[in-house]
Image (spheres, coloured by chain):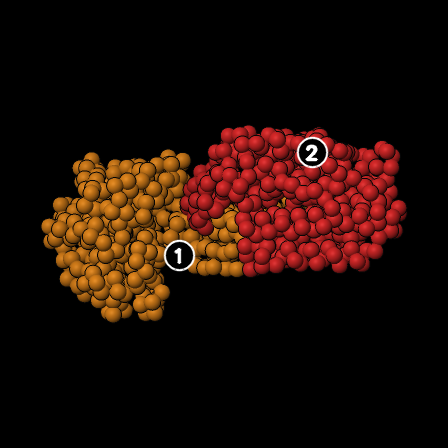
Chain colours: A orange, B red
Amino acid sequence: MATIERTRSAERIERDIETLAGRDYTLSDEAIRRYAYTDVYRRTLDYFTRELETLGFEVYQDPVGTLVARNRPRGEQAFGVGSHCDSNRNGGKYDGTMGVVTALEVCRLNEELGLGLPLQLISFLEEEGSGFGQMLLGSRIIAQRVTETELKETFRALDDERSFWEHAQSAGYQPERWRECSHVLDDLTGWIEMHIEQARVLQDTRNRIGIVNAIAGYVHADVVVHGRGDHAGATPMDMRLDPTLPLAESIAELERLAQAAGKGTVGTVGEIDVEPGIINVIASRVRFSLDIRGPDDDAYRGVARDIAAFVEQAAKRRGMHAEFTQRQTLAATPMDSRIVGALDAAAAASGEPYMQMHSGAAHDTMCVADRVPTAMVFVPCKDGISHDPAEQADPGDAALAAELILNAIASLEQISS
Amino acid sequence: MATIERTRSAERIERDIETLAGRDYTLSDEAIRRYAYTDVYRRTLDYFTRELETLGFEVYQDPVGTLVARNRPRGEQAFGVGSHCDSNRNGGKYDGTMGVVTALEVCRLNEELGLGLPLQLISFLEEEGSGFGQMLLGSRIIAQRVTETELKETFRALDDERSFWEHAQSAGYQPERWRECSHVLDDLTGWIEMHIEQARVLQDTRNRIGIVNAIAGYVHADVVVHGRGDHAGATPMDMRLDPTLPLAESIAELERLAQAAGKGTVGTVGEIDVEPGIINVIASRVRFSLDIRGPDDDAYRGVARDIAAFVEQAAKRRGMHAEFTQRQTLAATPMDSRIVGALDAAAAASGEPYMQMHSGAAHDTMCVADRVPTAMVFVPCKDGISHDPAEQADPGDAALAAELILNAIASLEQISS
């Protein structure tokens, strides 16, 4: 295992992070606000391009703007590292960007230490959806999980309603060649993405590193309970059809079901709309969202099935009617056990506290995993705060992550060569 | 007991109602929309003025526009009947207006049958709050439950933000004389207001008449539960501070407490705001409203006290913090037992199905009851629908109400004379 000068790596990572938090790289003075085809985004890609070219990497962008850098000619195999460098609209300095910066540090260390590992860095376009309201857009294009109609018509800029297609063309890209984006993954032997955790598991368990062994799948759904909007003062308790009662029972039941399912299953009601929403009127209708996730498809899908049945019964028992509508679902993404094992061995050798865990949040790595063996590395973020200017993470943890990623790739390349 | 030609009375009531639902009397083509100082409201008062002057009544308006009509000179005692003829902004034909129309029918019958009862009809200004966002405004001015600062500064038109004071002056009234409005009640020996029920108790129990023996008091309050807005996917169930759980427990507990309290106590959560209100974010904060009412002050206030304690405990048990803030409270208004008794005797004599009940909704009569013995009569409205163009009530029931009111007043006047 290589040992690195972690302090120096942490300093370089911090310098990159702070540079990219400067005025040239964000549309907002109060937050990081950076998304595709803006000047601040272009300057961010230029920064990475300069740094990587200095290391002797060949840098190019795919037909819609995902940045790719290689220290081997195209067509030769390499190991992938990277993340995304766009932010949500009211973002912090670390989400995404720290992952690309850490991947850059892996590339630097590889050269400095003369390890000669074949590497490919990727910075995916539009992970956060700030430009066009579409999460994981760059990696979904690479994975061909979009349609041409979506790119031409459906996906429109939040700023001006113009299509993704038009914006990409105006910015000098060639969206008509979007199918060729898939080649970005052609020569990868593996992929490791580093990201801040965006939750508080690492902080609360005092671990510096999380090795991700699965990315949670999810069911997103809506429930509508139809009640009767009677006068809150004039309608006796036993003459009501109050849809807030099935809502209440469902919130409590969702918690119970998720806890009973275990295996990292979680369930959340994040949106509640009450109509008409007036203090002295019994609700005529309640809508609420369900976010049910976990790394175990059977477990979280079971909770989704059970809560759907429960809300219908809870409404029916009170003479009301409920509708459960699935918005979206995506299966869990298991990580590659070889890569997870290599990261675990590297972490163990580092002597630093770490754990294996799953990712509850979605990441570009989900789209990479279709074709390439993948894993992720998490570092803690303070109090789990993310997507907020208050986001904080420690460059020292990122330097440690760079060391583990470097050593894991080295051990994997050794085995395969 | 006088018997009236109910069919003819029903026809007259229907004619009045339909006239006042016509184009000259509402600002909207799709609903009744009528409030103080608009042309349509002025025409409505003119209609009642003409009809009452035809019966020989002296008609005047108080300094801000409440309509008063008497068949005895001012200074002589009379029995009060009436309601309000403004509507909410998306209103129906019956709420308020049917009460004034029925009071007019009582006046007509008194003349036709030569009963010679001393009567005073009142149509209160701005019961619904459509003009200035203030419910029961005319009757509160009469009861002096407002301040001059409120009239001059605080109460502002929803349409143009100008003050009540300015609007009253522009319309030719004398708001500077508002304290004299209290004289409207000076010479009343009693007061009966007829109103549609605005709930479904009468319909569901197949009664044509409700004799109101109390108007519910209420506590209006807000509860805020402070949680922590973590990532819905990445935060394990046992690391959450999710304020929707105390919300759920409180909704269920409020139902339990109201049912346990009995005595007509009701409790409703009509408003729920979730922040940030995003499907994949655990709520950081939940606010919900409480509307707790009943005719028995001890009973509903006990529920308010108990739910306030409950929400604090429910939040605390989960490591969160809840705040209970009372918005407004008003004691219950008992009706006068003599007037209720007289109405009950008249209803019994009519042979029609009736019941005694309390009013869960607020009415101008609450402000009259400070100084005058009062009661109310309810008639059914279809499915309890009110404050909506779909509002429906039966002129036949209103004619029956007119008969009972007439007979009750006659019996009360007989006793007192």
The answer to whether residue B180 is above or below residue A163 is: above
Q: Residues within 10 Å of mark 2 (few under 14, many from 20)?
A: many
The answer to whether residue A256 is above or below residue B143 is: below
Where's residue A98, x and y in %?
Answer: 26, 45
Quadrant of the rendered image containing residue B290: top right
Where's residue A11, x and y in %?
Answer: 19, 37
Instruction: Please name the residue shown 87% across and 37% down the image.
Output: B414
Give the residue type at disc 2: Leu
Nearer to us in this view, A172 or B343: B343
Q: Are marks 2 and 1 in contact (CB under 8 Å)?
A: no
Nearer to us in this view, B384 or A246: B384
| Helix, strand or loop for disc 2 | helix
**Which residue is tagged 2?**
B185
Chain containing the residue with disc 1? A
Q: Is residue B60 left or right of residue A78?
A: right
The answer to whether residue B371 is above or below residue A251 is: above
Position of the C terminus of chain B, as image quadrant, is top right
Give the residue type at disc 1: Thr
Quadrant of the rendered image containing residue A8: top left
Chain containing the residue with disc 2? B
Residue A157 visible to the viewer:
yes
Instruction: Please name the residue shown 40% across and 40% down the image.
Output: A201
**Which residue is tagged 1?**
A333
